[in-house]
Amino acid sequence: MNHETGPLGMSNSEVDLALFGALGDLALRKLYPALYQLDREGLLPETTRVLGLARQEYDTAAFQARVTEALKQRVKASELDKESLKRFLARLDYARVDFNQVEGYEAIRGWREGSPRPMIVYLAVPASIYGSICRNLQASGSLDGETRVVVEKPIGYDLESSQEINDAIGEVFPESRVYRIDHYLGKETVQNLIALRFANPLFGTQWNQNHISHVEITVAEQVGIEGRWGYFDQAGQLRDMVQNHLLQLVCLIAMDPPANLDADAIRDEKVKVLKALKPFGTESLGRDVVRGQYTAGTSGGQSVPGYLEEEGANTESHTETFVAMKTEVANWRWAGVPFYLRTGKRMPEKLSQIVIHFRQQPHYIFDPDQRSLAANKLIIRLQPEEGIALQVLTKDSGLDKGMRLRPGPLHLDFSSAFPKSRIPDAYERLLLEVMKGQQYLFVRRDEVEYAWRWCDQLIAAWEAHDSPPRRYPAGSWGPVASIAMITQDGRSWYEDY
């Protein structure tokens, strides 16, 4: 097989990419910009081609024009040069296909005829038709023993539906050729979390219950449901965000060191974390979990409607748009260390952040009124700007300050530290890893299922109690009860943004 060598000596396989849902929101917003940037950086081999597949009546020229329009909206003008754009568009073909009719899949066979390259099948479509597409690909003779399939979350609505979808995929593709995307795993800072933990003894020796008092994870969205009422009201924030994004972050924070960086070595350790997550009982459900739903308020200086006032809303809906919870990883490394998770829509800003709170020194010798400062914090920012900061204490400067303490960060801001380097989008990294046949940034089937098992017990408890979510105004940090939940432990959410 032909290869080209990318940065750091990495070998990138030549591939053919068949993209189902080629005119959908995900493809237009994320996939084409990511592929374009890879091409612009010289990371796509010359022979790599892309076939867009959708139900609409387009020809290739009209398809290329639509992709160009999407790129102009999503890529900086300074990065959209004519030569790179021309080269990228020349890779693109289009075919109209009814995904549920096997006859249309002949277009894929025709496009692939004579190609020595492996094919990547990217399913940027609802999970409900993953199985149908996989079976039709097989029945049409479009697959070979090297074809890889990429699927997006959410994979299912609960454990049972997840198993049905994964069974349908597994009838056609072995697990070694299935790539389940969680785009958070492609972020530069998440990759640096692995390096930070396992390449630095400073943190590696401190990463346990003896030195860490608690962990916070916040994934806040400033937007509302963005016209996705039909989907979101059936899912809710727990299924939409906690089951995948937040639990993946918990796994990366809490997992033990893998034997090596092989995909299964990393994913084996993540599964151990999911197995060790404590379930919620009747008492802890009321004390340690807060569900919320936004009401009318102000976001970005504009008045916005409440969830029940959105277009097409069911005014009786109890679907949560906010979840905060306190949980624990019940194993030797983390016993007694609470993990506080928080995610919601219509928050004051878009923010994804992990805060590791280290324990205070056992003996404190400075001003008593500053004792609350006397603990280090590691702040890992995933968005909007990616970066890592370690908050340390130093003596405040000045002759009149005495031995007063002052908190300050040791800060690594990726955009400032590497001003000549563009921070790649998560999808660029993920697409590149699929092309190289590397699975370590993708979610294995048992990870998905253990995450669903944990979430399903919480959903079942909510349904048994049938209590409505607590209200919070759009533009706030959620229900007051979410503040009380962490305050009862003598702590507060870190909001020094």
Image (spheres, grey):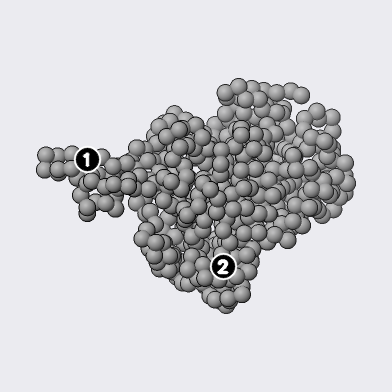
Residue 445 vs residue 151, the one in the foreground: 445
Q: Position of residue 464 (x, y in %)?
A: 61, 75
Callout 2 crowding tier (Cα within 10 Å): few <14, some 14–19, many ≥20 = few
Mark toward the start of the polypeptide (1 vs 2): 2
Tell me where residue 107 sits by quadrant.
top right
Image point (52%, 70%), residue name: 283
Q: Is residue 172 left or right of residue 268?
A: right
- 160 relative to 31, above or below: below
Q: Residue at x 51, y 46 (%)?
A: 333
Report x, y in % for residue 370. Answer: 24, 51
In the image shown, does 12 or 306 lie closer to the viewer?
12
- Asked if one can make out residue 269 in the rendered structure from this viewpoint, the answer is yes
- Residue 62 x, y percent position in the rendering: 69, 44
Left or right: 356 as drawn, with respect to 92: left
> 217 or 120, which lies in front?
217
Residue picked out by circle 2: 281
Gap between marks 1 and 2 measured at Cα? 45 Å
| Observer able to see residue 473 | no
